[in-house]
Structures are given as C-alpha cells and as structure tokens.
Amino acid sequence: MEKTEIAVSECKSYSIKDVHTATKTCLESLGGLKNYVSSGDIVLLKPNLLQASSPDKYITTHPAIVESVISLVKEVGGIPQVGDSPGAFDRNINKYWDATGLTDVCERLDVELVNFENSGSYHKQRNGQDYYIAKPVLDADLVINLPKIKTHSLTILTCAIKNLYGTVPGFLKTEYHKLAPQPSKFSEKVVDIYALNPPCLHIVDGVIGMEGYGPSSGDPRYLGMVLAGNDGVAMDSFITHVLGRNPLKIPTNRLAYYQGLGEADLNNIEVRGVAPVINDFKWPSNLSHTLELIPGPLARGLMSLWYTRPTIDSEKCTMCLRCQASCPTNALKKPGQRTEDQDQYIPEFDYGHCINCLCCMEMCPEKAIYNGKSLLYKFTSLFQK
C-alpha cells in the first residue's frame, strides 16, 4: 500500500528568508510545486483570517507564509489569488486584509484579493444537507490551503480540515453553528464542507501556533515548523500526534477518516523531514464532548449544575459589540437596566438561547470572553487528564 506523504521543515522565525526556505524545502520533498501547478493555472490561496488581527497576535496565518507561497506559485507560472471569508463577516473585508498584513503583501506582489462575499457561490449537497461554497474556490485550478495550527474550543483542533470552513461565504457559517450546536454535530458540518471542496495542497503555518482556549483566546506557542501535503486528514492527524494526542480523539480527524476522506493511521503516513517533539502542548478541556455520551434528559439536568459557558470580563470589554453581531442565536442582549437608546453597553448572555458555539469568543478582539465554569465543572476537571 502506497503511503500518504507529508513534508515538514524546521522554521525558526517569520522572517521571509526562514519561511521561504522552509516552505520550499517542504515542497521539494514532495517533488516540487510544478507537480501541482501548471503555467497559467489560477491558484487560490486560502489563509486563516478569523479576525482583523495583526500578525503579532498569532490568530491568523502569518503574511510571510502567504508571501512565500505567492512567490513560489509565480515561479512555476501560476496566477495566484488570495481569498477567505472571515469568522462573523461584517461586510468590511478590507479591514481584515489590512490588519492581517495581506493588503501590503498582495499590493507589493500585484496579486488579487478575492472577496468571497460578492463573488457568488455554488449550491452543493452532502449527507442530505445543503451547503454553499464560494465560486472562486471551485473555479480555481488549484486551492492551496494555508491554515495555522491552533486549538479550538469546539472542535479541539483547527488546521487543514477546519480552515476550509472559511470557503462558506458570509453569515452561513454562523447558521451552521446554530443548526449543529453540539461539538460532534458541528464537526460533521465541518467535514462535509471539507469534502465538498476540491482537492487541495495544504501548507501549514506551524511556526507559532496557539494552545489553550483557541482559536483566538488561547496563548501563542512556538512550534517551529512548516508542513506541506495534499491530504488534509493526514496533515491534521500527524500534527495532532506531534502535539501529543491520539489523532482519532479529534472529531474532525475521526469523521473524515471513517468517511474515507484521507489517512489518519500514522503507520500509513510517510513523513519527509523531522518534526519537533512537543510533550506539554495545552489542549482545551473536552468535558463538553463527554456530555454528548449522556442521555438527553440526564444531560440537560446535569447542565444546570455542571457547565462551561462564555462569560464576559467587564474589565477587558471595550463594548465594540462584535460578540453580539457574531452570535447566531441572538443570545447576547442589551442589559435590562440600560435604556434602548444607549449606544455603548456590555451585553448580557441569555443562556436559554446560547448554544455554546463560542462564535463570540472567536470574534472578541480583546480576549474579553472566557469560559465561565460552574463549581461542579471545576471539581470534575480535577480528575480529567
């Protein structure tokens, strides 16, 4: 049986020299970019642009990664484009390009920035569900997926598989959260969208990732690597292993593997290069996933005493209201004691409507939203590995 190939190269910094050397080394280990791109091909680069955050926050794909890949695509005669649909899109895509450093990169290199929101979408179906994928993604000759290694409080890991969730334009992403509030159900949506995307080349920003409560409220973590491969399931599975966890404990890895969308058996993955050994990576708590195994009526009773839910730190909140705009169930309300005509206020959660999708946490630029935990939750956490 022929093994799935993944390339990994050490990358000590985000200097363009270090990044370009590491990226080129990975691609050459796989036979070179010419194996994927022909002269004249339209090549869409899809970074992770979760927030309009500067690169030094380490929330988004670093612009040095994007710049390096653009240069390599041009070297083999491809025509690069860069596109994404950020988290809770608010129609001002330019502020995302500007803040993340991609406006500067693409203007210098004369590359088009593609707005998924006004480019139209194709209707697709999978597992009896309707989905919409941005037209530039499916119209491209090749998509190069440029994820960043981060934890995710709902899916545990966000990397190659989860990054393609951003090929869904506009507010449909938050609607899918609403339709699938449980981690396992939401992971099914993520895997469906991954399957509906065309085959990709995945080049992973693993120089500085994020651990803890990602994908935006966690802590930066130096990992020192760039990876490349054409199997996103194998990529995420190998990265999970490197970070000290069983790949099949990540729901998106498990679902995609069992659906035949890629390789998760490490014995069938050939790694070209040497990955770092990381034994103390901090993962988010997955007690909410355990709750899914408990029968519904009992689970609902336990939730009244045992829960983790988004909570606002009033000291950090700047009242920008991005959390409110991102909430798919309108669970963030004006405080009852405030007047309706007051422009600035700290929202209050209506937990009866909150589905714990954590879109609010993802979109908060100040990390003012954290996981509030009940006393029972804190106690049981002491016994979790």
Image: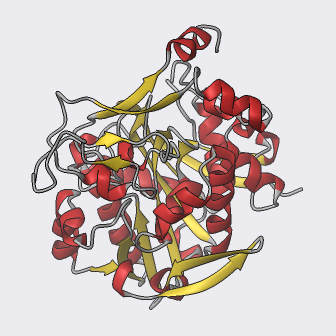
For this rendering, which residue is in front, 158 or 18? 158
Residue farthest bottom in this picture = 40
317 displayed left or right of 265: left
**Residue 290, placed above or below residue 124:** above
> x, y percentage for residue 149?
47, 43
Colour setting? secondary structure
Q: Is residue 194 left or right of residue 282?
A: right
Question: In terms of depth relative to the viewer, which is nearer, 236 or 339?
Answer: 339
Q: Nearer the viewer, residue 139 or 35?
A: 139
Is residue 325 or residue 347 the one in the foreground? 347
The residue under the point 67% across, 43% down is 237
Specify whether residue 289 is in view. Answer: yes
Q: Is residue 164 above or below residue 42?
A: above
Residue 261's x, y, as percent? 75, 62
Image point (49%, 72%), residue name:
168
User: Which quadrant of the rendered structure holds the N terminus?
Assistant: bottom right
Q: From the image, which quarter does the C terminus lie in?
A: top right
Give the quarter of the image for residue 67: bottom left
Position of residue 46 in the picture relative to residue 164 (left or right): left
* Residue 228 visible in the snapshot: no
Residue 73: name its quadrant: bottom left
State the image coordinates of residue 218 (x, y, percent, origin top left): 38, 32
The spot of residue 231 in percent (x, y) is 66, 59
Q: Above or below — where is 68 with respect to 218?
A: below
Q: Height in image: 195 above or below 293?
A: below
- Residue under the point 52% across and 13% down: 378
What is the quadrant of residue 277 in the picture?
A: top right
